[in-house]
Image (cartoon, rainbow, N blue to C red):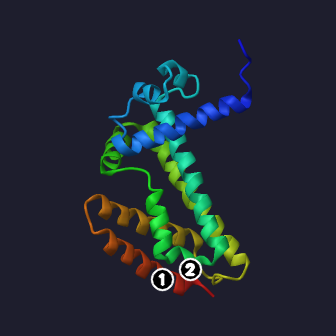
Amino acid sequence: MPKVVPEYKEQARMRIIETALEMFSERGFYRTRMSDIASNLGVSKGAIYQYFESKEQLFVEVLRHHGERRARVVRGFLESGSLMSISTGEFFDEMLELRLGSLELSIDLLRETARNEALRKMLVGIAEGWGQGLVKLIEEMKSDGKIRADVDFSSLSRGILALRDGLYSHLMMGADRNEVRKTWVVIMGYLMNDVLT
């Protein structure tokens, strides 16, 4: 039997995460079973449990991976332009394309986190990590002299994420995509004009 090298293990782990990301997004948390993910990959359920102890742990890793992908896109926009670039329709479209989930997944998570304290704590930690990542990007722009020195970075970060989450909720409930996109551009434009030097 050939020896399993670390690179293979990491590739296998990432295949599981990518497949789980698609399935959680499409089906929601409850309707996605570990056996479904295994079947989709053509492996046994036990093979997945070699990498992840539970569906909750896999879901948390999916969120972390997804957050890292989104962070790379945000950084790319910022490096190719300015902070103002995140107030564009193009940025909104890119983030919407990367959005994890459906209305069903959002409802499942609200239900599950209400009863599963451990999962709730993990998800809060991930969300706080996303916010801290945005704060770090904003702080870098301040040190470059692109943002006013008196801006409260934490509040700005939370405000941006709250606007994003609120608009995603409207979309999930059937709001017109063009109107939601326009709202992002207008409100973020006001916000960016206020904080940029």
Looking at the picture, does residue 168 appear above or below residue 115? below
Front-most of 158 and 72? 72
The reply to whether residue 182 is visible in this rendering is yes
Looking at the picture, does residue 184 appear above or below residue 38? below
> Residue 151 falls in which quadrant of the image?
bottom right
> Would you say the residues marked 2 and 1 are in contact, meaning their CB atoms lie under 8 Å apart?
yes
Residue 186 x %, y %: 41, 82
The reply to whether residue 114 is visible in this rendering is no
Front-most of 157 and 186? 186
Residue 114 x %, y %: 34, 42
Could you tell whether 142 is left or right of 113 in the image? Answer: right
| Badge number at residue 104 | none
Q: Which residue is mark 2?
A: 84
User: What residue type is disc 2 on?
Assistant: Met
Look at the numbered disc 2 and give the secondary structure of its residue: helix
> Which comes sooner in the sequence, label 2 or label 1?
2
- The residue at 49%/19% (across/down) is 44
